[in-house]
Amino acid sequence: MDLLNNDNLKKKKTGFNILSNDSTDGHGGYGAGVMNLDNVSPVFVDPAEGEAFVDMGALHARSAVEKRIKFLKNKEEVPNGKLYWLVWVTINYKDGKPYYAGVAGCEMTVDIEIRRGYKSLPEHVNKMDKSLKGHILVDDMDDKSKKILAEFLKTHNEQMWENSEKALHEALEK
């Protein structure tokens, strides 16, 4: 046995994996606890333009809104930033029917002229996690943004909207 074989000296690289289906097949070993992002979508709400859109690049902070922007931790450093809401929307199934299970909005401001923005990365991660767990967290959002989001979700799939919990309807249609 050659212990100095270069193949034996190469280190195994591990990193954060985004996996679909059951990564452990029930064994509970390596890969257990890895987040499954198959059912979550990042929806941007732009209250100034009155629109909402999906940008999957936001899963890795690479959305069109975020590109070429340096994000700062202090909101006051971006006084002329345009407001966006990044809303994590999770879809689950109940009785074989899809529905909007988790919806959590995070504030983000972007000033394209100075290429600076504000967002709280811990808030974005925590709210994505809450959305994955089926929580509805939109209280921080302004009423106009909530209405834009509600209309987007209805238009995207009216049946999923109808299958969703009353809590979602009440939170977005106050």
Image (cartoon, helix red, strand yellow):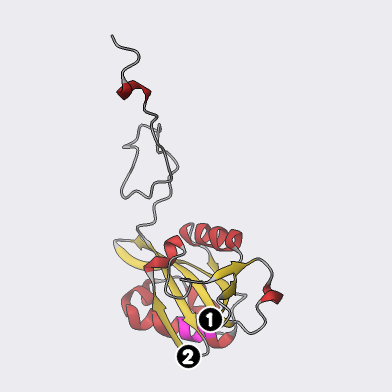
The answer to whether 97 appears left or right of 76 in the picture is left
Q: Amino acid at mark 2?
A: Glu
Residue 34 in sight from this viewpoint: yes
Membership of 147 in magenta stretch:
yes
Above or below 57: residue 169:
below
| Residue at (42, 85) in percent of width and height | 151
Work out which residue is located at the far right of the displayed protein and give it.
76
Work out which residue is located at the far top of the displayed protein and give it.
1
Q: Which residues are magenta?
A: 145-149
Q: Which residue is mark 1?
A: 112
User: Which residue is at the front of the view, 35 or 75?
Assistant: 75
| Residue at (69, 69) in percent of width and height | 74
SS at mark 1 in the image: loop
SS at mark 2 in the image: loop
Q: Which residue is mark 2?
A: 49
The first of marks 1 and 2 along the sequence is 2
Q: Position of residue 155 (x, y in %)?
A: 35, 83
Membership of 166 in magenta stretch:
no
